[in-house]
Image (tube, rainbow, N blue to C red):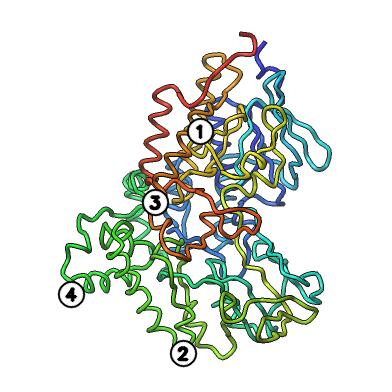
Amino acid sequence: MGAESQADYDVIAVGAGFAGLGLIHYAREAGLSVRVFDKASDIGGTWTWNRYPGAASDSECYYYCLTFSQELLQEWQWSVRYPGWKENLSYMHFVADKCDMWPHIQLDTEISSADYQEDNGLWWIKTAAGEQFTCKYFVSAMGMISEPVIPSIPGMDSFDGPIFHSARWPEGLDYAGKKVGVIGSGATTVQMLPVMAETAGSVTVFQRTANFIMPAVQQSMTPKWEAEIKAHYDEIIDKCRNHVFGMAFDSPVGRNLADTPPEEVQQIFEEQWPRGSFRFVFETFDDLLTNPESNRIAGEFVISKMKEKVKDPAVAEMLTPKGYPFFAKRPPLDHGYYEAFNRDNVRLVDINEAEPIVEIDATGIRTTQNHYDFDIIVLATGFQAYTGAQEALPIRGRAGRLLRDKWNEVSSSIMGVFVADFPNLFMITGPQAPFANLPTSIEQNIMYIIDCIQKMENEGHDICDPLQQAEDEWVAHTAEIHAQTLMAQGDKVHSWMMGANLENRNPRVLIYFGGANVYYDKLRESAADGFPEVEFASLTG
């Protein structure tokens, strides 16, 4: 008798964001029973956890969405180019409502462990409340940026006011007129500062590393723009599927900066800059991320635009990225961040060199040079990308081996989906998958996973056993490509994209940089070839 007949569900997944909702659709379409758990009290993933002021997507709305239904694409109406968390969450509810996904979702449920059972090939899932479930296929849909990093700063417990990670924003927090300290200057702070500065008494940003920051250029959706989008959705989806970062951009553009006269370079940069978003990188020249000199020129242009906005030369100098190439760290999008530093109630503190943080005490933050009094302290200190959620949950494979232990030195996988010694475990955008427009990558991953499961069901297999050799080859391939990129250059590429923001881990290659489009092709080739990266087996022989 096959393992599937013994399981409570064919598929159990953890995470009710884009990945969980997409998985419900494709699993049901394949005739599989599916249950999605989430410890949050609402669906939405990123958009139910990240409710800080100014939280918004950095991908443009019309391709930051699930694409499996033309009906959904045509019916939903976006209000702005970059939707805030409330609108993104409303969109997720629209999808769940329209597609009747709620019966497959169990919220307010923290999964406490997931254990592979070698005797019957099932995964045994336990909840913190004591419930137990079994499934044939266990899927991590927990997201690549979902596990917060809490810094180890002496005295954090002694602070008298609210102190919290930005991804755990307290409901109803009133910061109007208050003195707020923000530790961290990444994408969250870039979005948060302009909004908070409007009503807070003061906001002090403690910056370790300055970022290259691109203009967002927020725009309202117009009837004409919406009609144009909806008339060309097939083309938009195709662009995302075939773009190096999974975005609906018109690139490559067929020209290199290295071959273009300097005056024409500046003209093209000036023309493209007002369009905003990451289009500046992908729709100006094709060699900005491959040619070091072209990259340097582009980076200098970005810095010059920042210095036009920041009035105080000393602050502008602090905000100038140094020691690493443009785009070696993922650039945030600007919604008024630089202009906020022209306000009297906003300060910037360099904690990398000028005055590192020494401790937090009852009334604020002490650096090597000063003491800053605060009513509220926000830890905008980022996430353990790609592996954090899977490591926070005890996931045990063959012989009871913990996934977090396997990843102690190298966060290895096969295409970010399979892990050797963890049969019938699938990850959606796990480590060593590309960093790209997430809904695009999520859907490509889900379709690949469901194809694998359908092959197993159709052919009577109980076990999908990822091959160690295939994992070794993918790790080596990913490392080889990484060594050729800007991420491997510079003395200050202190990026969360490498896990360099973790105090207890060495940086490692977490991302496939060969191009999202190339990666998607590899998934399809693997499926067409019968999934040679894994070995299929039956419990009954």
For the residue marked with disc 1, what is the amino acid? Answer: Glu
Disc 1 target residue? 471
Of 194 and 100, the residue lying toward us? 194
Q: CA distance from mark 1 to mark 2?
A: 51 Å
Q: Amino acid at mark 4?
A: Glu
Residue at (40, 23) in percent of width and height: 529
- The answer to which image quadrant residue 5 occupies is top right
Q: How far apart in space, not on screen, are marks 3 and 1 (Cα)?
A: 23 Å
Under circle 3, the secondary element is loop
Q: Which mark is residue 263?
A: 4
Which residue is labeled 2 in the image?
Answer: 312
Mark 1 and mark 4: Cα distance apart in space: 48 Å
Real-space Cα separation, disc 4 to disc 2, in angstroms: 29 Å
**Which residue matches tag 3?**
245
Residue 201 pos. (x, y %): 66, 86
Observer-side mark, 1 or 4, equals: 1
